[in-house]
């Protein structure tokens, strides 16, 4: 049993997810019972599926989160208690809800049109390869640390490609890189702030394009994360992420991406498939989360 869905008048109904349907069908079942709150007990994939269905249907039901996955990134970014089911349940049933944005991606994946929401992060490159390279058995034993083990293979698997980017309806601009991240939230496991400006309530998505090749360029990228957007940001109080030659930051409400060849795309830790083009948009105040 992965998800508990409370309904109105203090009634409680339970709806199971499955590998083929991580939460959309269960959410529909819960809404048919008249649920005021839909509690997603699972990982980011389950939370994403429930949030997507609530946003797509325009349901007034609120979303509660009981983090039981590997990354639990939305829960981390929203301050939902981790490793404490009782506290998470208490917040899900009794907490005050606040509206957050969702990102939406539309892509042609293997000849099929796909539309999917994301609550945390969309991207291609290192993160997508890292997810594909992670050993499932190791992940079940050590959790998110399994991603660290696969990071080296992911870096080696990425290659720089040409990218045409059109931001907020503007004309496409040619650039290049091996990793593009589009984030609604910016904090990862271990408190790492990959996208320091990302805020799931600001009506925008944050962008990070990485292009480092070789040790010297990766040192430049690391300096950008640790110094420019870490220590120096704390000292100076700068209010926007600083870009570097190998790590460019940006913001957008809509984004169109054309790649010189198909690459694997991931949404909130799930492999969406390979695509050479996709479009991203933000839905403001898409779902109310406790």
Image (cartoon, grey):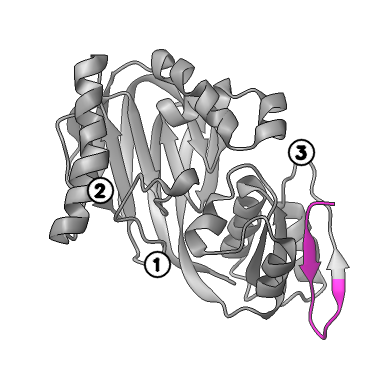
Looking at this view, is 102 or 269 the one in front? 269
Left or right placement of residue 270 versus residue 197 in this view: right
8 in the magenta segment: yes
Q: What residue is rendered at 59% in x and 50% in y? A: 72
Give the magenta-colored segment's residue range. Answer: 1-12
Q: Badge 1 is on which residue?
A: 201
Task: Please tell me in which quadrant of the rendered image residue 37 appears.
Answer: bottom right
Q: Badge 3 is on which residue?
A: 19
First along the sequence among labels 2 and 3? 3
Q: Badge 2 is on which residue?
A: 230
77 in the magenta segment: no
Task: Single out the mark in the foreground, 1 or 2.
Answer: 2
Give the vertical position of 132 relative to 81 (above or below). Answer: above
- Give x and y (percent) for residue 150: 52, 22
Mark 1 → mark 2, Cα distance in angstroms: 22 Å
Q: What residue is rendered at 70% in x and 59% in y? A: 40
- Give x and y (percent) for residue 260: 31, 19
First along the sequence among labels 1 and 3? 3
Q: What residue is rendered at 74% in x and 67% in y? A: 86
First along the sequence among labels 1 and 2? 1
- Give x and y (percent) for residue 136: 68, 26
């Amino acid at each position: 049993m992965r998800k508990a869905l409370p309904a109105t008048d203090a009634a409680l109904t339970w709806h199971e997810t499955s590998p083929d349907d991580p939460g959309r069908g269960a959410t529909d079942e819960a809404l048919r019972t008249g649920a005021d709150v839909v509690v997603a007990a699972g990982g980011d994939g389950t939370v994403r599926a429930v949030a997507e269905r609530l946003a797509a249907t325009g349901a007034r039901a609120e979303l509660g989160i009981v983090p039981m996955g590997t990354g639990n990134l939305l829960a981390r970014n929203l301050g939902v208690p981790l490793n404490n089911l009782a506290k998470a349940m208490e917040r899900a049933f009794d907490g005050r809800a606040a509206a957050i944005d969702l990102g939406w991606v539309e892509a042609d994946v293997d000849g099929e049109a796909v539309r999917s929401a994301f609550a945390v992060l969309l991207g291609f490159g290192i993160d997508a390869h890292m997810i594909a390279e992670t050993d499932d058995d190791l992940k079940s034993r050590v959790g998110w640390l399994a991603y660290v083990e696969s990071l080296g293979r992911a870096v080696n698997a990425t290659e720089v490609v040409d990218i045409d980017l059109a931001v907020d309806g503007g004309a496409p601009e040619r650039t290049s890189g091996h990793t593009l991240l589009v984030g609604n939230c910016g904090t990862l496991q271990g408190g790492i702030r990959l996208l320091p400006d990302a805020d799931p309530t600001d009506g925008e998505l944050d962008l990070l394009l990485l292009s480092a090749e070789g040790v010297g360029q990766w040192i430049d990228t690391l300096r950008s994360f640790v110094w420019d957007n870490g220590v120096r940001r704390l000292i100076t109080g700068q209010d926007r992420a600083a870009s570097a030659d190998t790590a460019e930051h940006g913001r957008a409400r809509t984004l169109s991406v054309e790649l010189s060849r198909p690459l694997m795309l991931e949404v909130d830790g799930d492999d969406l498939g390979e695509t050479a083009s996709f479009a991203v948009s933000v839905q403001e105040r898409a779902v109310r989360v406790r």
